[in-house]
Image (cartoon, rainbow, N blue to C red):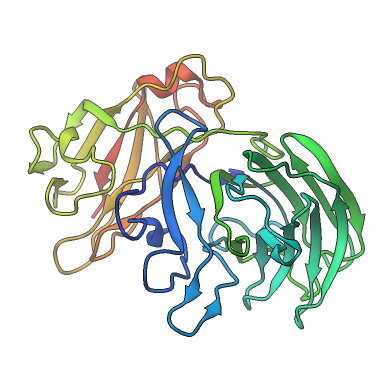
Amino acid sequence: MTLLFFDGFETYDAAATQAVGMGDVYDLHDDGTGSLVTIIASTRITDGQAMRINFSLLGDTGVNIARGPQLPLTAFSSADEWVFGVAMRATGGLGTSASVRPIFELLDSDSNRIISLRVHDNGDLTLDRISTNLTLATLDTATTAITGTDWNYVEMKVKLSASSGTYEVRVNEVNVMSGATTSTTSTGATRPSHLRFGHILNQPLDFDDLYILDTTGSLNTDFLGDIRVQRLRPNAVGDVNQFTLFGGATNWESVDELGEDDDTTYVESKTVAQRDLYNYENLPTSVTGIFGVIAKPVLRKSDAGSRTYKLIVSSNSFEDETATLYPAGSYVRQAQIFETDPNTGALWEEAGVNNAQFGVEIVS
C-alpha cells in the first residue's frame, strides 16, 4: 500500500484552546499556551477546517519558535522515495526578506534537518539540503512560484540518497523545479523519520489537505494533484451493533460528535468477536478520483490487562480489516487507511464509499 497518510484537519475540535486530538498524531511543539497550533475554518471544502501555525514566543524567554508541528514517518514505510502534498496559504502575506521559512522539512532519525522546501518573501521557492552544522546548500529555485495570500497546493517528491538523489516540486499541479543531484542528504539518511511544518516570521501560515505516499506498489505511486480531504461522520446504525451504548440515543449517536467528548457519550464492549458498524454521511455529489478512505476512531481500554481490536470496513457484504491494534489507557486517535474497496478490489468510487459501513471489532 502506497498511500501512507492524509489529513484534512477536519476531525479536530476548533473550539478548544489546544487543537484537541492533534497531539495524538503530531508533535505540536506547543509553547504551553495552546497558541502555536490552532484549527480554523477553511474554504477549500464546505464546512472545512485547516491547521494554522501562528508565530509565537517560547514561554517567557522571548525565544522565537523556529519549528512547527511534526509528523513521525518511520512507521509508514522504509522506502527512500516519498511524495508529499499540502495546501498552504500565507494569510498575512509572505512577510519581509527576514521571513524565509520552510513550508515543510524532512528530518532524519537523529532529528537532523536534511531537506527543506522554503518560501521567500517574493514568492520564490527554494529546495535546500541541510548539513548537520545547519549549512544550507540550495538544490534548486522556482521564481515567484507562490502567489500572494491565495491557497497554493504544493507537492514535493524526493529520493533520499548520498549519491543519486532526485527531486521534483509542483505548485498547483505545475512542475516548478526538478532534477537529479549527487546528494539529497548530507547525513547518509535513506528515508525520512519526520515531516516538519514551518511558519513565517510574524505571520500565520495555514495548511490543509495533506497527503503522504511512497513510490512502491501499484496504486497511488506518484503525485495526486490538488486533493481535498472530506470528513464523513456516522449518521445511522450499521448491520451489526453489539457494543453497549452510554449517553447516546443510539450506538451511532454515541460516537458521531466532532471533537470527542470522552466518557459523555460512547460505546463499549469486552466480548471477543463483538463488533459495531455504522453507516456514514454521503460524499458530495460528482466526486471523482478517490485515492483512499481513512478511518479515525478515538478509543481507550477501560480495564487492566491487554485489550486488542481491529477496524472493519464492509462493502456490499465484502470486508476488509486492519491488523490487530492496541488501545491505550486514555483516549487516543487512531488512523488507518483503506486504499481499495473490498467489494471491487480497486480504488474507491463514490457509490462504494456512500454504501460502505465502518466500525470496530474486539479481538482480545
* Left or right relative to 169: residue 61: left
Residue drawn at (71%, 38%) of the image? 223
Residue 267 in the image, given as x and y percentages of width and height: 15, 45
* Left or right relative to 362: residue 313: right
Residue 327 in the image, given as x and y percentages of width and height: 29, 59
* Left or right relative to 95: residue 206: left
Residue 307 in the image, given as x and y percentages of width and height: 23, 60
Residue 8 in the image, given as x and y percentages of width and height: 48, 42
162 shown above or below 118: below
241 shown above or below 88: above
276 shown above or below 167: above
Residue 353 falls in image quadrant:
top left
Residue 322 falls in image quadrant:
top left
* Left or right relative to 98: residue 2: left
240 shown above or below 14: above
Image quadrant holding the C terminus, namely bottom left
Residue drawn at (11%, 50%) of the image? 264
Residue drawn at (47%, 27%) of the image? 341
Residue 173 falls in image quadrant:
top right
Q: Nearer the viewer, residue 32 or 307?
A: 32
Image quadrant holding the N terminus, namely top right
